[in-house]
Amino acid sequence: MTASATRATARAPRPARTPTATATATATTSPTTTGDSQVAGPNPDPGGDAHSNGEPGRPGDLCHERQRPCPDRASRDLTAQIAYLTRVVRAPTIAAVWADLADQARADGWSHEEYLAAVLARQVAAREANGTALRTAGAHFPAVKTLEDFNLDHQPSLRRDVLAHLATCTFIPTAGNAILLGPPGVGKTHLAIGLGVKAVQAGHRVLFDTATGWVTRLRDAHDEARLAHDLRRLHRYHLLIIDEIGYIPFDAQAANLFFQLVSSRYEQGSVLVTSNMPFSRWGEIFGDDVVAAAMIDRLIHHAEVLTLTGDSYRTRNRRELLAKTSPSPSSAALTPPTVQPTGQVTR
Ligand code: ADP
Ligand code: MG
């Protein structure tokens, strides 16, 4: 036990016999089962009798002779009790921070309410961080990309207001969609992941895959006669990301499966799609103008469309790098010569 914990507990008043404490005492005489885990508890009866009767000491016990709490034993037992209780309520962060925060509370004169709020806030923050990490892993993003890393200077015509609106994720609870269109390399996948990360941070469940990946999933489900079941199960995801529609044309079955996916999401859950093809050419992707039109209709009914333009970021970056590191002979030839005061001409 730390010094702070000892101080924290040694001065604690003798806890009253509360329903919680009584229940705890009953439950902890043997290993306690909570949910699917077994938690072995100390003997934390805070209202127990003095240990002068020969029984094991308990928090709040009084010293035999002087009839006052034994600081060491009381604080040890209170610490054990807190450790036990935080395990039962599955609050490991509280277990980790309560003693230090108690020190801080004493030093800064916090009220009991302020101390309680601080301890709970730390637990909630830790739980949210864990939830975000789990949802991020479950989303299967292909890379780590954030909106903050996206260089907007390379997309001067991008609607920043629309991007900012999408980043708030308010379109997700209303089952709205987002559509990112533009040629290869302009950052559609980057933005799709960045928006997916925002959604995860806002507490939404997200699932990312490429269009061909989605078709493979749907085909497998169809072949195993569980398509309807799987489409229903996808409703547990608030946002599905379908990346790269258009790179590979779909056969008739794939187009049909894809249509079923989009239809099942309509006004039920959000979809974010990216495509290198304008809507006018989606008939070529799906091999059928009518299916393509029906799909576009459902996608854009409640959607924000962002159009990206320009050169591929990769090739532009490479060009700029090459220009900086090794000026070509032609660019050197274009540099005007400098005439020195001596009359000497230099390049
Ligand atoms: P697309 O999906 O449109 O083909 P990507 O999103 O895959 O393009 O972008 C290609 C690469 O260039 C990625 O590594 C991406 O992070 C990067 N990139 C593209 N545009 C930008 C940008 N404006 N700012 C920062 N990185 C960018
Ligand atoms: Mg892409």
Image (cartoon, helix red, strand yellow):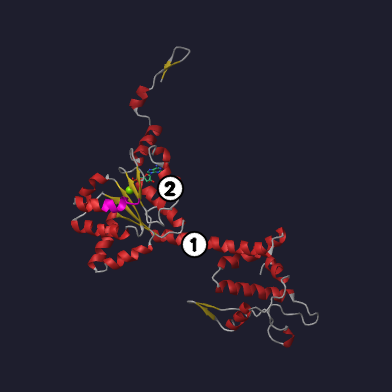
Residue 146 seen: no
The quarter of the rendered structure image containing the N terminus is: bottom right
Vertical arrangement, residue 208 with respect to residue 335, above or below: below
| In-front residue for pair 215/40 | 215
Amino acid type at mark 2: His
Span shown in magenta: 295-302
Q: For the residue labelled by badge 1, is the local secondary structure a helix, a strand or a loop? A: helix
Vertical arrangement, residue 330 with respect to residue 300, above or below: above
**Discs 2/1, front:** 2
Residue 79: x and y in percent read 65, 72
Number of numbered discs visible in the structure rendering: 2
Residue 90 in the figure: left or right of residue 261: right
Residues marked 2 and 1 touching at CB (< 8 Å): no
Residue 82 in the figure: left or right of residue 148: right
| In-front residue for pair 165/75 | 165
Residue 123: x and y in percent read 56, 64
What is the crowding at mark 2: few (fewer than 14 residues within 10 Å), some, or many (at least 20)?
Answer: few
Q: Give the quarter of the image for residue 267.
A: bottom left
> Is residue 101 shown in magenta?
no
Which residue was labeled with disc 2? 165
Vertical arrangement, residue 7 with respect to residue 61, above or below: above
Residue 6: x and y in percent read 70, 69
User: Between marks 2 and 1, how big is the CA–CA gap?
Assistant: 26 Å
Amino acid type at mark 1: Asn
Residue 302 seen: yes
Q: For the residue labelled by badge 2, is the local secondary structure a helix, a strand or a loop? A: helix
Residue 114: x and y in percent read 65, 61
Which residue was labeled with disc 1? 130
| Residue at (25, 57) in percent of width and height | 259
| Residue at (54, 60) in percent of width and height | 125
Examine the residues drawn in magenta and state their main secondary structure. Answer: helix
